[in-house]
Image (cartoon, helix red, strand yellow):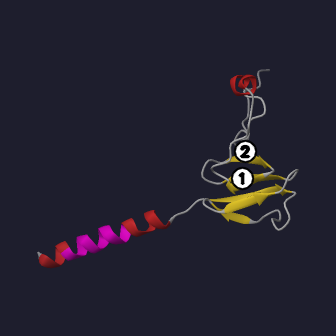
Amino acid sequence: MKQVRQFCAIAILGAALPLGAAKAASEVLESSVPGLAVGAKLEDNARVKLPDGASLRVLVVSTGGTKTLKGPYEGTIEAYKEDRSWWERITGKGKDSDAPIGATRGFKAN
């Protein structure tokens, strides 16, 4: 009976280990930032520095959407918030994150 309990404990711990180790990352899709090339992978907590006039578009793996950052900015991708007027916030214009990448097929009636 002791061996069964030890086996169960090891199995539960072994199954739980990969859950904590998984980290989502972002991938650079477009960049005018010196030192950040297209295709570069960034961790969620990575700090980026965008000079004035620079832009960075990344694919956020955890959400499947893209996010566009505009300089000047220094901080994490997750913390970026674009400064928008109240009208832009209400209408959704000028948002800093785009729709998720993907496609759908519509029904075609004959």
Report x, y in % for residue 77.
67, 53
Which residue is at 74% across, 29% downward? 106
Vertical placement of 63 versus 91: above or below?
below
Query: Is 33 on the left-hand or right-hand side of 77?
Result: right
Mark 2 touching mark 1, by CB under 8 A? yes
Query: Is 66 on the left-hand or right-hand side of 62?
Result: right
Which residue is at 28% across, 74% downward? 10
Which residue is at 86% across, 52% downward? 52
Neighbour class for label 1 at 10 Å: few (<14), some, many (≥20)? many
Residue, disc 1: 59
The amino acid type, in three-letter code, at marker 2 is Ile
Label for residue 20?
none
Label for residue 101?
2
The amino acid type, in three-letter code, at marker 1 is Leu
- What span is in magenta? 6-15
Q: Earlier in the sequence, mark 2 or mark 1?
A: 1
Between 11 and 67, the one nearer to me in the picture: 67
Dividing the picture into quarters, in which one does residue 92 lie?
top right
Report x, y in % for residue 18.
45, 67
Which residue is at 68% across, 63% downward? 42
| Quadrant showing the C terminus | top right
Q: Main secondary structure of the magenta part?
A: helix
Between 74 and 61, the one nearer to me in the picture: 74
The residue mark sitting in front, 2 or 1, is 1
Dividing the picture into quarters, in which one does residue 40 lie?
bottom right
